[in-house]
Amino acid sequence: SGEDQGGGSPGARGLGGHGLRRPPRPAISRAAVVRRTVTRLVVAALVVAVPLTAGAQPSGKVYRVGRLGASIEVASLDAFRQGLQDFGWAVDQNLLIESRSAEGQVNRLPALALELVRLKVDVIVAAGDGAIEAARRATSSIPLVMAVATDAIERGFVTSLARPGGNVTGMTAFTPELAGKRIELLREILPKARRIGVVSAPTAFHRSELGRIQAGARVLGFEVRPIEAKDGATFVRAIDALASAGVDALYVQPSAPTDPSRGQMAEAALKARLPAMGAIPNYAESGFLLSYGASSIAWAHRSVYFVDRILRGARPADLPVEQPTKFELVINLKTAKALGLTIPQLLLLRADRVIE
């Protein structure tokens, strides 16, 4: 019928554009209103709760960071912890540090690296070529941060500085120009010196740097007497041997096995009345006359940048390897006094730190 087709009421016809009134809504009981309101609240709560729960999951994870080195100093570990704090990490809360030191015995590094792998750390920070090599052999999947390598490309740790490739990134301290600079500093303090004894480790890097030291020494009128040593004890004996050979000063190249013996080497040099130059700032802190190079404390702090990026999802292969841009000249006036040396005032003014 017509009523069935049109809706049967003036109000209904009004919806078709022929009337002015909307149809009356059916009455709803109070109980129905309450049920509808409760249902909406429950649905809204579920919608909000799901993303919050999913978002909270990553922040609840506790990450493990392994640190590996021939020796790990308290100051270096403190700098690393401070770096983590600067990047917003809470040590012992959302991040745990697993430190493994070979205590100068580099033959222990492979076993210590495997220990970190078994702990399933999220990233390994390795200081020095020996530690980096041990970590690389232990894993090709866990991200590895170099802090720091001598020459990362020559050692085969990375394919290039801009695009490291693989699971390795971090910092490399390949700075060949520093060898000549250190010789110049010795010349400023010892204008009458003629012979420099160079103590180095039997590695390709040290032999390569020795060539640069010899080239710089020739320009300044020095004769170089090189000697190799493989650990702290033999480094001390090497210093004694060079003293007997009549050298006027020492240049000690950095070497991970000798790091724990810096104090002993400084004592041996002082006993032999030989001014000693170190290639890392903390050598002067241990009693060397002076040192010039990039700070291992700064390396430890900077390595956190790579750790932070990796833990937040970056791939090591995409993080360019960095080289040091800031170098420290540290002069130990206590040692100078013990040797009866006067440090030129201009050199003292150029020093980043003076130990008195």
Image: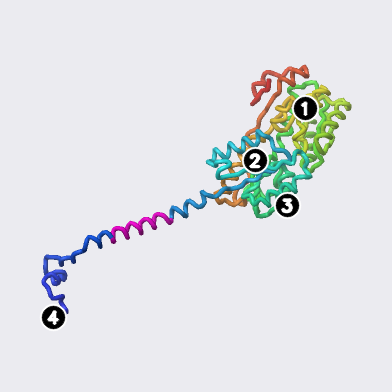
Residue 300 horizontal side relative to residue 237, left or right: left
| Residues drawn in magenta | 35-50
Instruction: Please tell me whether mark 4 sits on a helix, a strand or a loop.
Output: helix
- From this viewpoint, which residue is outermost toward the front? 31
* Residue 306 in view (yes/no): no
The residue at which mark 1 appears reads as: 266
* Residue 62 in view (yes/no): yes
Between the residue at mark 4 and the residue at mark 1, the CA separation in whole angstroms equals 113 Å
The residue at which mark 2 appears reads as: 323
Taking the magenta stretch, the answer to whether it contains residue 261 is no
Between the residue at mark 2 and the residue at mark 1, the CA separation in whole angstroms equals 28 Å
When the figure is inspected, residue 295 is found, relative to residue 356, above or below; the finding is below
Image mark for residue 311: none
Instruction: Please tell me whether mark 2 sits on a helix, a strand or a loop.
Output: loop
Lower sequence index among marks 4 and 2: 4
When the figure is inspected, residue 20 is found, relative to residue 310, above or below; the finding is below
Residue 99 x/y as whole percent: 67, 42
What is the quadrant of residue 9 in the picture? bottom left
The residue at which mark 3 appears reads as: 137
**Which amino acid type is shown beneath numbered disc 2?**
Gln
**Which amino acid type is shown beneath numbered disc 3?**
Arg
Residue 338 x/y as whole percent: 77, 18
Image mark for residue 2: 4
**Which amino acid type is shown beneath numbered disc 4?**
Gly
